[in-house]
Amino acid sequence: MNKVVTLICSAALGALELAKENDIVITDTAVVEVPCSGRVDEATILRTLRQGAQAVLVVGCLASNCRFSTGNFEAHRNVDEAKRILEEIGLSPSRVEMVEVSSAQYMKLVEAMEMMADRAGELGPIRLLEGDP
Amino acid sequence: MTDCRSNLQRVLDSGNFAVTAEIGPPKSASGEAVQRRARLLKGHADAFNLTDNQTATVRLSSMASAVLCMQEGVEPVLQMTCRDRNRIALQSDLLGAASLGIRNILCLSGDHPRFGNQKGAKGVYDLDPVQELMVFRMMRDEGKVWGGDTLEQAPQVFLGAVANPFADPLDLRAVRLAKKVDAGAEFVQTQAVFDLDRFERFMKQVRERHLDERAHILAGVIPLRSAGAARYMRDRVPGMSVPDEVVDRMSKAADQRDEGIEICLETIERLRSIEGVHGIHIMAIGWEDIVPEIVDRSGLSQRP
Amino acid sequence: MRTVVIAGCGTEARTVADEVVRQGGRAVLLCKEPSGIADRPNGRMEVKASSLIAVRGAPGRMTAVTEDGDVECSSVIVADEPASVALMPWTTPLRSLPEGRGPRGTVVLDLRGGPDRRGRAHALEAAIEMLADGTKVVVLVDEVLAYGHDELLYRQAQQAGALFIRPLAVEREGQRMDVMDSISGAIISIFPDMVVSETAVNQPCTDRGSVSMGPLSTYRRGVLRLRANLLEDELRTEARAAAAIALRPPAEMPRPAMVDEGKCSACLTCVRICPFRAAYMNADGKARIDGDRCMACGKCAAACAGKAIALPGSTDTDLDARIVAAMEGE
Amino acid sequence: MIIAERKGLDRIIEMLDGRRSILVAGCRSCVSVCQAGGEREVVALAEALRLHAASKGMDRSIDTVTIERQCEKEWVMEIAPLIEGKDAILSMACGVGAQIMQQAFTDVQVFPGLNTEGMGAPEVQGVYEERCGGCGDCVLHLTGGICPVARCSKSLLNGPCGGSQDGRCEIDPEKPCAWDMIYRSLVRLGRPDLLEINIPPKDWSHSHHGGPRRVVRKRAVLSEEEVA
């Protein structure tokens, strides 16, 4: 079971392909493509955590050149909202993070994924009722 | 009818330059502090304001403090804010004050509860100060409470209001004072004057509306104790205009306390020369014992 | 053969029309006074004496609605003088501000509602030069959004004597302009010799289209915009680019977001946030997404307060399924 | 519209302590528009509560529904089947909706998920400001269309007070002074004369101070026969 889920917008997906071309192996993180980071709302992030993810990384384009011009601003607001909710229900907000990459910055993306994997390791799974290991 | 006018009214109506000051009631059930200050200040001013839970902070009530002052032979000015009482309590307290011999009544809105130590309090604000004056004048002149019921005996009171020439918008300040005078204000105590140019512009508008002929205007002054006090007043007290020159003078002064008194005396000197100013109101809350010195050194110690 | 409708009469329109024909397309030129433009003998260029009212459809199958009838085409190029519906009809566009030699007397620089940072800096530099010449300059601003370099410009302009006003209201009577200052409420009467304003509202697209949506692009897919008063060689390159983009085969259409009118509370959030102006309110006060404009980014689906908007292929259930599958996958 | 704001989740969790089966009920009317209790908020809140329950190993079921208008009995009765087996209803409507819900389902406790903050409008998207004080005796014609009861911190009818500076209220620089706005509006409307008249004491009996109000629209009240 993957510990980290990365919700990545289709433009930033290019950075992932570039990472693979530079034969970087990405371990125990599940990648899910979304049309734009702006599509990710706080409920989606919370549902992902409830499906068993220990950390969620939202990947959007750089601030000025989002293909849809303002998608990443919406994403930032939703990620902040999710962090606030986690704090209010007693879970660590650092389980959720957002990073902005251009399709060339594959190292920045890989580092972010590794950071989230470390956090997932530290924080451990959320004690889940069903199928709790 | 005996001369039921107050000493302050007598002084003002006879054309003398009046002096009033302020005593801040303590946060205590003991009136001793009020009486001590009253004894200290007796004879140095024509009447003394007893603030009504200033900055929305719970203190010995203004009414009780007024009675304590009268026991020391000192004439009080009772302050009645619209924040703490609805129109029933305001009218009943007016009757109570009159029954106790209190003559001078100051109507004001009162600092918002957010400033004081009861931030969760529900401000009443049933009436606003203009309406408070209308109600009190009706009780005095028509012997009726608001709504028409007649009183066996009408309260004989000298009605006062406050004005802040330094709040915005400037053009509205004289208009609002006109409303208060129309509503029944006979004397007016203004916010502390530091910015004399703006005060003179305000007084010009007051004279244009002949308000100085219909009400006695007393200009407020505050002696500054330190540069810190000056900065605090300039930056933190809403509706207060303290020019930078005053703050600079205070910070450069060798003895800030003397410089503060010096500035106060100079201000009083200028205020006495402004047409339409019929007196000064010294607000030295927490520094009441400086009032005698200020009154003496400004040549106002011979009270009529 | 693809048809491109070109709106405008100026040299820009004619240049790009020729370019479309040269690149193998058919041009329909909408121009009110078609003097001096002959139809091309081979029928590849047609001139219609009417003007463009609206555009419908998506790239590849568009309809240009003109004053006398519709024209089927694959894309539209707007090349007429930018509709500078200025605040005051007789204002001078910022771009054509004379370098330094403003008129003697008073100039009002009206910077409210735009221009973007670049335009604002250009206006302030011109103001400083005019002030040096002894011209009196009054600058009307919404709010002074200035940081770094611009801040210096504002201070320089102020020190040079420019009067900055944040007006609450501006009324014009003949030559007199009454500006009500929002701080003091005072009414300041000015008798300007020239009023300079820039109607280019803060568009995310730079003059040459949006950096992310492609050159010459506008909010409307399939509609390109050619800037006015370009220099000779600039015009040729832009015209060539415009014709090439216009004649390019349209990309496949993304499936637009759909609104469930039963759930829509008409809260206008989608209308406000859609980067492509695709969301609007229909006649019965419910939101609707214009399929031709929607780029399927899903922002409105995430933001909708009543969860009334779904993006086919990326609905909540779709995302859930993908998340679960991905987690169990690798 | 009515403006409301979600209570802190920690407060909500505290309120729902010990409850096993919860229905979170949103409303499509005002609280959707002010982004407090619409379906999106309901879904997000339910997810948060489920995640919290999961993280604490609580055995709790959370269902959601969003009602067209929670202040209408008929609309509220539509969700009666969902109430079966529930031991708590978390209403994400304004205070009115929560009370109609409790009136409709008397045997299941209704908990308020939102704090209602009065009647107002968005200043910009996401920022909602009180506009109307509901005093039952409107004076907007005297104050240039700006309500002194709701927007002046002291509800002065003959303002401004001595604390107004740079158009700001003395208690909070973020809050504009209502009377400063009234002054500008009346100047703009060419009615500065209205600033000179003394508005007499207000008859507060039309407001809540006269007791809870009851508005009867005669034309709409059905007769016995029609209802029977």
Image (tube, rainbow, N blue to C red):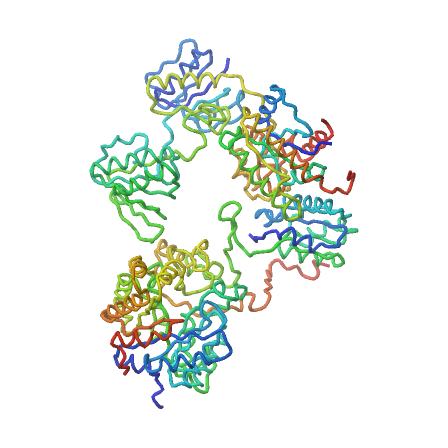
Q: Is residue D111 placed above or below B210 in the rendered structure?
A: above
Residue D220 point in image, percent of width and height? 62, 58
Question: Is residue B246 something that shows in the picture?
Answer: yes
The one nearer the camera, C168 or C79, is C168
The one nearer the camera, B23 or D119, is B23
Task: Give residue D173's quadrant in the image.
Answer: bottom left
Residue D209 point in image, percent of width and height? 55, 68
Residue D164 point in image, percent of width and height? 40, 60
The furthest residue to the bottom: B1
The residue positioned 46% from the left and 70% from the top of the image is B127
Q: Quadrant of the C terminus of chain C?
A: top right
Residue B42 point in image, percent of width and height? 35, 82
Q: Is residue A79 placed above or below C78 in the rendered structure?
A: below
Q: How many discs mark residues in the rendered view?
A: 0
The residue positioned 33% from the left and 76% from the top of the image is B20
Task: Give residue D141's quadrant in the image.
Answer: bottom left
The furthest residue to the top: C42
Q: Is residue C216 placed above or below D61 in the rendered structure?
A: above
Q: Is residue D119 left or right of residue B75?
A: right
Question: Is residue B141 something that shows in the picture?
Answer: no
